[in-house]
Image (cartoon, rainbow, N blue to C red):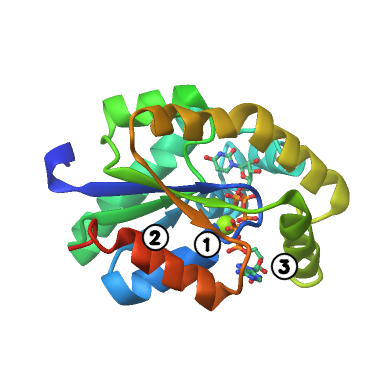
Amino acid sequence: FSPSDVSVIFVLGGPGVGKGTQCSNLVKDYGFVHLSAGDLLRQEQNREGSEFGELIRTYIKEGKIVPMEVTVALLENAMKDAIATEGKHKFLIDGFPRKLDQAHKFEEEVCPSAFVLFFDCTEDVMLKRLLKRGESSGREDDNIESIKKRFRTFKETSYPVVEYFRNQGKVVDVDATASVDAVYAHVKQQLKDRLK
Ligand code: UP5
Ligand code: MG
């Protein structure tokens, strides 16, 4: 596909901040295709015959960033798929890019982003959300050891991506501390002019 035929919004924020939850809301109201990089990696991990299964499992459990070739290929394929099967062209890319080199590669080789939706709240709040979800999620990284590692990777490696986009004037900020509905109301307000 040609970059001029699609629009991409990156949805970024720390582990458990509520990226997936708010993307689901946006899908309902605005018909985006929601692509969570983490979900795509977990699917690939469980796909029979995948050569990357073990690698992905280890990286996710350690809160480390999977080599970008794997993630970018999964995202690009999912985008092609959505265009071919659903004729959709508007994408929310959730949890990616998490490292500067991924941002560069994706924007140069796949498609530049329109803007970045950035969710923020304290680690305490994220920790509570993740531990609660961990009671039933079955996610191998929803335990205190993995969560601490995910927080560290976010601060050291992923947050600089947000700063990079902020310097380009592309970041739309949303405080994610309040209830799901209150946060979503804020999202809609912040995106009012951008989603026409
Ligand atoms: N919840 C949500 N909003 C709430 C609110 N306002 N009030 C109260 N509760 C709220 O939400 C988390 C939990 O909180 C849920 O139970 C929800 O109901 C509740 P969710 O919407 O799932 O948050 P989200 O930000 O999506 O959290 P997630 O855990 O998915 O974020 P991560 O960024 O940690 O996980 P992701 O799946 O993106 O990545 C996992 C791993 O994959 C990474 O650590 C990394 O190892 C790997 N990865 C890569 O290597 N490369 C990539 O490009 C992407 C991922
Ligand atoms: Mg998520």
Image coords of residue 42 (percent x, y)? 59, 52
Is 187 drawn above or below residue 59 in the view shown? below
Binning the other alpha carbons within 10 Å of mark 1 as few (below 14), some (14 to 19) or many (20 upward) gives many
Is 90 drawn above or below residue 55 in the view shown? below
Residue wearing tag 1: 20
Rendered image quadrant of residue 124: bottom right
Residue wearing tag 2: 34
Amino acid, disc 3:
Ser
User: At 54% from the left edge and 55% from the top edge, which residue is drawn?
Assistant: 39
Q: Do the residues labelled 1 and 2 touch (CB within 8 Å)?
A: yes
Image coords of residue 135 (percent x, y)? 81, 70
Q: Earlier in the sequence, mark 1 or mark 2?
A: 1
Q: Which of marks 3 and 2 is nearer the N terminus?
A: 2
Front position among marks 1 and 3: 1
Q: How far apart are marks 1 and 3 (CA)?
A: 13 Å
Left or right, residue 103 beside residue 114: right
Q: Is mark 3 within 8 Å of ligand 1?
A: yes
Regarding mark 2 in the picture, which secondary structure is present there? strand
Residue wearing tag 3: 137
User: At 30% from the left edge and 40% from the top edge, which residue is drawn?
Assistant: 113
Q: How far apart are marks 3 and 2 (CA)?
A: 19 Å
Q: Do the residues labelled 3 and 2 touch (CB within 8 Å)?
A: no
Q: Give the number of callouts.
A: 3
Q: Which of marks 1 and 3 is nearer the N terminus?
A: 1
Q: Does the residue labelled 1 lie within 8 Å of ligand 1?
A: yes
Which of the image's four quarters has the C terminus? bottom left
Which of the image's four quarters has the N terminus? top left
Binning the other alpha carbons within 10 Å of mark 3 as few (below 14), some (14 to 19) or many (20 upward) gives few
